[in-house]
Structures are given as structure tokens and as C-alpha cells.
Image (cartoon, grey):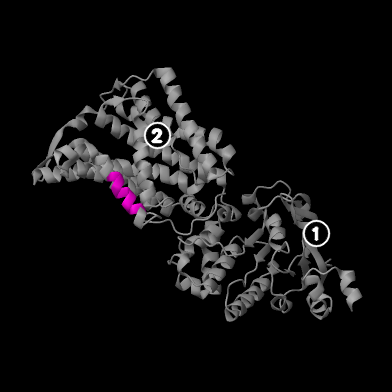
Amino acid sequence: MEHFVQTLVDAVSVGSLYALTALGIGLIFGVMRLINFAHGELITFAAYALLALFGLPVPIMLFGAILVAVVLALITERAAFRPLRSADPTTLLISSFAVSFFLQKLLILVVGSRLKGLDFLPALGRQVELIGVRLQLLQIATILVSAVLLVALTWFLRSTRLGLQMRAAAEDFRMARVLGVRANRVIAMAFALSGVLGAAVSCLIVVQTGVVQPRIGLQLVVIAFVGTVIGGLGSLTGAALGGFLVGAASILLQALLPPDLRVFREAFVFVAVALVLLFRPQGLIPARGLKERI
Amino acid sequence: MSARVPLLEVSGLVVRYGAVTAVRSIDLAIGEGEIVSIVGPNGAGKTSLVSAVAGIVPPAAGTIVFAGKSLAGIALEDVVAQGIALVPEGRHIFASLTVTENLMLGATVRADADGVRADLDRSFEMFPILGARRRQPAGQLSGGEQQQLAIARALISRPRLLMLDEPSLGLAPTVVDQVYVLLRTVRERGVTILLIEQNAERVFGLADRVHVMSGGEFGLSGTAAAIKADRRFDAAYFGVHMHEAAGDR
């Protein structure tokens, strides 16, 4: 029983991490129809910010990580994606690969490609006993942080003027602009929010793995992207659900598959993804009324 | 040309999409408080004309002056703040957002929160069905209700000029009647209207002046009564050159 609950909490925790990553990708896709693979670099750069600020008080490290991810997100939007705003989605996709590669190589050039250990928030590695089950504090923290961010993002999108404008822009950008919604402000806000989400994921993954390396974000983004697709591209609820399911499924398969099949767990996840797309090509929660871009 | 003060003055407007010219040197003036209609068949260039005024399509040539101010080079999102609201063809309501949220988006350029709230209540009085469905996603409304929402959303920006692109498209005739009754009410509130329609019969009872557009040009212009009585109407509507039409008779 204890093992089952531990596995379940682990699955929810990893699922939450992928849900946050998928939301970061989904936010940008919503307003720009851009699949931003450079989202991985926001996570990576935030991790290196933690490394650079290591030794300072934790709130300063967290603030630094968020600041770096948000500023980097805004710079990529301004320098790489804004000039291509009216380009077709394929061009945008390719440019996001270019930005991703550029930032990754830049990082390798400046700090090297070696793994660096980072003992960030070691207290979260402790085990705690909750209703008779021993759980890792980090897993609980991951679930709580994800829940808080999800609630905060939902509140922002549902209860603020800018949030409403973002939802409108995600559905029909041109009509939103006809009504006076400022394209630059809405897109910059989406990038900034994706930076905040990226930084949160970065902090959690660094605590979990204890290392920082230049490809730390890319690995997460590739899996989370699959999550946004099965969730339904353009739907934020779909992105969160899809990311969560892919992450959670991977942990559950690790626990439930016979030992000699465990090495193939990713293959099982992708078979499930293929089946979902076969029966629901538009995703589990398709976006309603998606219109052309700006 | 209207004797009243022109609110909108379009001169020599040309709209091109690549090699295709959709609007060929159009002059159009609309006086404050007027209802002017542009009628014409599919592909006449009507939507391109309003799209240029709304800032959606950049003109290849010509000037657009609104309330004495040139709209040249103005960003799409700044046009509504000048006092021009568009109800586009196909309505373009935000299907996943509620009726109230759609209306709030119409007030994007307004900073007076109290005034917006009052106008929201006024919209629900003017469009009772929207009041009854204010919390429903707009995608669940019928076509006629969506058209009412699109008009209400445009009005909440408090425009001086309301442009409607084929508001009767895809609606049942009785629903179109309701939409036209609404437009009369809008006019009584002092809003100037530019109405684009394929169905000329519909606009004759509402518009002060009518332009018949075909092939990117106005073939015939005049008061609604004069255009209705003009035997050249069919020729102008279907784009037969005027002197050819005269020669046929």
C-alpha cells in the first residue's frame, strides 16, 4: 500500500512538472501559433542563474532565476520572433530551433558543457511521514508549487483585463486587435509568463537532480511538447492535462512494467500518445474556435 | 457628397493583394449621423474597402481621414480608439469566452470602468437575449444572437462610426429583420453607420445614401430612393459598363 501511494505521489509530482513545462509552451502557441522549442533554454538559463547565485540567500537565488528566464524570454520575443510575426508557422518553428541551438551553444561556449553539481535546497530531499506513508518533501513541494502556479495563472487569465485579452488573442488575434488589444503587450506578457513557469520548473528540476547542464531544459521540453499535442494544441487546459499525463504515465509505467520491459517505458508512452492521436487527432481537450494568427 | 460635416472622407483609395486590385480609386464621404450603404456582389471589393478603413489592410494608394485626422500608418489596434468600430463579416465573436467577456473586450480602449459597467447594463437592456445569456460561452449562441453580440461589442467602444460588413449573411430573414430594427435604434443614438450588404433590397429602407460597388469601383451612387428607382441599378450591380448598359436600352 505504502509503495503504491509513493508511486502515485511520484507520478503526480513528475506529471506536475511536465504540466508546468507544457503550459509554458501552450501559452506562447496560444497567442503566436509558435511552438517554442527555445522554452527549454529558459529552463536551462534559469538553472545556470541558480548556479551563479549559489551561496546567496534562497529568495535572491529564486528571484535571480525568474528574472533571467523572464528577461531571456522577452529578448527572444523581441529579437527573434517579433520580426517573424507574420511569417508562416513553419518559419516560426524553425526559428525557434535556431534560437534554441544558439542559446545552448552560447552557454557551452561561456560555461562549458560539463555537468555541474548544485546542492540547491537540500532540505527538500528529506523524507516526511504523511498519513502513515513516507514521502520525499520535494515531491510534495513540486505538487504544491505546481498547484499554486496553476491557480495563479488561472486567476490571471480569468480575472484580469490583460488575461482576458490574452485569451481573446489566443482565439482570434486579428479580431482582438480590431477591438484595440495591443499585440505587443499581449505577446510580451505571454513570453514573460512562460519565463516564470520555466524558472519554476528549473528550480524544481535542479533540486531533484542536483546537477546543472546545458541540455537540462531541452529534454523536458521535448516530452512536454508531446503533452501539449495530445492535450490539444492551443488549449491551455489541454496542455496542462497532456503534460501531466505524459509525465505521470512515464512514472507509473516505470513502476508497473515487468523489470525487463522497464527500459522500454518511453516506447510504451509514445504508443499511448500515438493511440490518443489516432482516436483524437485534435487532442484530448481541443481548443475552441481557433482562428488565424495576427 | 453629403451636405453634413464629413466624419469619414476616403479619397482615391486603392487596395491591392499582390497583383490583384480589389479597390480601384474609391472616393467616399460619410456625414455625421448618416447611414451609408455599399451594396454589391461577392468579390466587388466591399470588404476590402472597410478593411482598409479599419486598418486591417494597408491601402496601396489614397487617403482615409476620420474626424479631420488622417489614419495613414495607424496601427490596427489604434483605429478603434479613434472612434471607428467594425462588425466584421462572419461576426468573429470569441466562441470560448462568455457573452460578458466578449462585451468587455469591446471596451478594451476605454479607461472609465464605471462607464463601461453602465454601458454593459445598457447593452443588456438593448439586447435582452444577451443579458439572459451573459454567462454562457458565446459559441453556444445562435447565429442571430451572435450577430447581436458582435453589434453590442462594437457599440460598447462608444464609436462615432459603426461599420458592419454583411450583418445579414447566414441569418434567417426574420432574424435579419430584427438586426435591421436594431440598426435603426443604433442610429437614433447618434451613431454614424457604414453598412456593407449584398442584398440591396434590405438597405433601401434603412440607408440615407447607397453606393453600388462592382469590380472595385462605385458604379452608381445616390440617395437610397434614387438608387432604388434607377433603371441602371442591375447593370451597376453586376458590373456592366455604364455606357454599354445605356446603349442596350
Residue B115 location, x and y as percent? 55, 61
Please give the name of the residue rendered at 51% of the width and 71% of the height, measured from the top-left corner.
Answer: B124
| Amino acid type, label 1 | Ile
Residue A124, disc: none
The answer to whether mark 1 and mark 2 are in CB contact below 8 A is no
- On screen, residue A105 versus residue A80, left or right, reads left
The residue lying toward the viewer, choosing from B80 and B235, is B235
User: Disc 2 designates what residue?
Assistant: A40
Q: Amino acid at mark 2?
A: Gly
Which of A75 and A288 lies nearest the eye of the viewer? A288
**Residue at (73%, 52%) from the top-left corner?**
B16
**Residue A144 visible in rendering:** no
Location of residue B70 with respect to A36 vertically, above or below? below
- Residue A154 shown in magenta: no
Residue at x 28% of width, y 23% of height:
A118
Which residue bears the numbered disc 1?
B26
Camera-nearest residue between A66 and A251:
A251
Expressed as whole percent of the image width and height from the top left, the position of residue A263 reads: 22, 36
Q: Residue at x 61, y 75 (%)?
A: B179
Q: Chain of mark 1?
A: B
Q: Nearer the viewer, residue A278 or A252?
A: A278
| Local crowd size for mark 2, using a 10 Å CA cut-off: few (<14), some (14–19), many (≥20) | many
Q: Chain of mark 2?
A: A
- Per the rendered image, the range of residues in magenta is A269-277
Left/right placement of residue A100 relative to residue A185 reads left
The percent coordinates of residue B236 (x first, y second) are: 81, 71
Say which element carries label 1: strand
Residue A275 forms part of the magenta stretch: yes
Q: Disc 2 on helix, strand or loop?
A: helix
User: Magenta-highlighted stretch: main secondary structure?
Assistant: helix
